Amino acid sequence: MRIAMISEHASPLATLGGVDAGGQNAHVAELSAALAAEGHEVRVYTRRDHLELPELVPLGERVDVVHVPAGPAAAVGKDELLPYMGAFAEWLAGNWRTEWRPDVAHAHFWMSGLAAITAGRACDVPVVQTYHALGSVKRRHQGAADTSPPHRIGYERELGRAVDRVVVQCRDEISELLRIGVPRSRMALVPSGVNVERFTPSGPSVPRESDAPRILTVARLVERKGVEDLIRALVAVPGAELVVVGGPPAGELNADPYARRLRRVAEICGVADRLRLAGAVAAHEMPAWYRSADVVAAAPWYEPFGLTALEAMACGIPVVASAVGGLVDTVVDGVTGDLVAPRDPRGLGLTLRRLIGDEVRRISYAAAAVDRTAHSYAWPRIAARIAAVYSGVPGVVTESAHKAVV
């Protein structure tokens, strides 16, 4: 198949860990590569956010990234991109009519969906939607601090009814979509995957400066990721260090308001000497960071999927995670890690202390985690399931169907 991935703000070429660069970027990159490995041809369409970006950049064999000229050729926060989706859709439609018509378009995030469904209807291209995050959940947890456009939830409802299929990533997302009025018959449950050839238990690890047990968290430096809760929890884990990977590059952390806030919280809690902010880390270095940890903690208030927990599990590192969203599906409580209530630093600290102090439990969790990721979340398996969703969409013509006609 020819597959168009629409990812308006999350380029697979971006450095992870920034304000709008995280799990979606990695998901689109890995899914595209896995589909290409199966013989499909993939183009990822993302917004051009720099003047010097070429229109087309090869990402790998049979995968290209196309930079769409929609809005200013400069960085724009994702919540400010809605006015440019009409231009994005118009450019897509022109490209598909004259240069490269896909068999199916797969939109990632709701604004990508608006552009994809508009262009798809103009060019008779079926559209599959993955939300990655839902406005209803964000509004529930952030309240007045939610910066989403005011009609986001309504757009997401209508998208779910208009597209040919919605790929949901966890059971919790099914409930949320049903609540806003998306029919269950439109949904197919396929989780995100993990690259088990890159994220492995064996390999180099980032050196430690001391023998202190290491708790690692990988998160963008935003409040909802729960890093403040982890700092407060560190009080209950004497002797352990907390390493935070994410945010701006290490050299820019001193100028980052939220990084300064985290350090103030650590000082107030008396754990400033046990907190290390590592800043942004290149994607290829992440396995070594995971392997350096005794435990990986993921303590978000809410989480659509939780890719970092899956990456840690593939590296054979036990996970302590908030029992929210996709983390409830990926982390098997008491088997591959421990689930805790969100926004509960005391409970989080007690769970971390127990696990840090129980080497046998950590070894057991690690072995089960590696097995679970290999058998249920390896990208070739996930890509095959996604391709099956595409093939089941009316109007999508696969290679086997072409051969049957011939």
Image (cartoon, grey):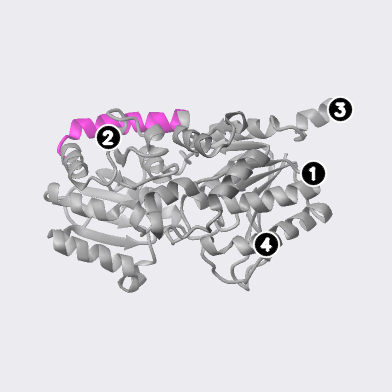
Q: Nearer the viewer, mark 4 or mark 1?
A: 1
Of callouts 4 and 1, the N-terminal one: 4
Q: Position of residue 186 (x, y in %)?
A: 62, 32
Residue behind mark 2: 338
Q: Is residue 61 visible?
A: no
For marks 3 and 4, the one nearer the N-term is 4
- Camera-side residue of 154 and 402: 154
Pointer 4: what residue? 68
What residue is at 50 percent from the left and 57 percent from the top? 148
Q: CA distance from mark 4 to mark 2?
A: 43 Å
Q: Residue 405 shows which numbered tag?
A: 3
Query: In x, y percent, where is residue 228?
Result: 26, 56
Name which of mark 1 and mark 2 comes first in the sequence. 1
Three-letter residue code for mark 3: Val
Q: Residues within 10 Å of mark 4 (few under 14, many from 20)?
A: many
Tell me which numbered mark, 4 or 2, is placed earlier along the sequence: 4
Q: Mark 3 and mark 1 in contact (Cβ < 8 Å)?
A: no
- Depth check, mark 3 against mark 4: the one in front is 4
